[in-house]
Image (cartoon, helix red, strand yellow):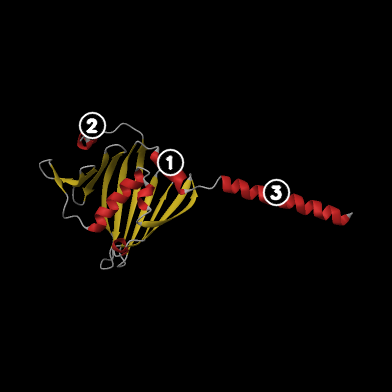
Amino acid sequence: MPAIKSLLFLSRLTFLLVLVLLCHAAQAFSLQDLQQQLAAHQTVQGDVQQKRFLRSLEQPLLSQGSFVMAADKGLLWETRSPIASVIRITSEGMMHQNGAGQWQPLQQQGAGSQTQIRLFMDLLSGNTRSLSGQFTQTLQGDAQGWTLTLDPTSSVLKQIFQQITIRGARSIEQVTLAETQGDRTEILFSNVRINQPLPATAQHALEP
């Protein structure tokens, strides 16, 4: 009789363990879930603070600005300090705004900066699939708090980045870019507004 009770107890325990594992698997947060969560954002806008840690400097270089992303139009990336600049990415390509307010092709931007800006656009719009051919993606956490680690796979990106780490919840909150030569960039997103009306100036700038 004790042996039968022990077997029944073990059977129930096994059943409970299997049930817990199945529930955990059902609630697992996948790359597809993250993509769907971010893709639901038709517009995203907010403030940006960037810290650039260089091996040759004791203190990081600090820049501040804002961004506006419209899923069907493109991305505006504005830096207000220490030097004012505005970059626009649309189907026409990557452009910058000159002092007269005219848009000109961006040709002198470094490969690392171009990759960084395109990365933000892909992530903000939920286009994580475009990263699959360039990075190995590792996702941890859930919809309320997740970390996506990108390890470069192409030879070109391996020369620039060692690893990229993105943290977020409903939207992206922090991006850390560790470069191959030892420098590091940390970007913090704040005052993020999702699916809110865009400023008239941003709408005009993103018009085809």
Report the amino acid beneath label 1.
Gln
Foreground pick, 92 / 44: 92
Mark 2 or 1: in front is: 1
In the depicted view, which residue is nearer to us: 193 or 1? 1
Asked whether, in this view, residue 1 is left or right of residue 29, the answer is right
Q: Which residue is tagged 1?
A: 36
> Looking at the image, how many numbered discs can be counted on the residues?
3
Image position, residue 61 (x, y; %)? 26, 58
Are the residues tagged 2 and 1 within 8 Å (C-beta)? no
What percent of the width, then of the height, locates residue 148? 42, 53
Identify the residue at image location x=68%, y=51%: 17
- Relative horizontal placement of residue 13, taking residue 32 as reference (left or right): right
* Residue on which the image places disc 3: 16
Of discs 3 and 2, which sits in the foreground?
A: 3
- Please name whichever residue, 128 or 101, is drawn nearer the observer in this view of the structure: 128
Q: Residue type at mark 2: give it.
A: Ala
Q: Residues within 10 Å of mark 1 (few under 14, many from 20)?
A: some
| Mark 3 or mark 2: whose residue is earlier in sequence | 3
Q: Quadrant of the C terminus?
A: top left
The first of marks 3 and 1 along the sequence is 3
Of helix, strand and loop, which one carries label 2?
Answer: helix
Which residue is at the far front? 133
Dot 2 corresponds to which residue?
A: 200
Give residue 79's mark.
none
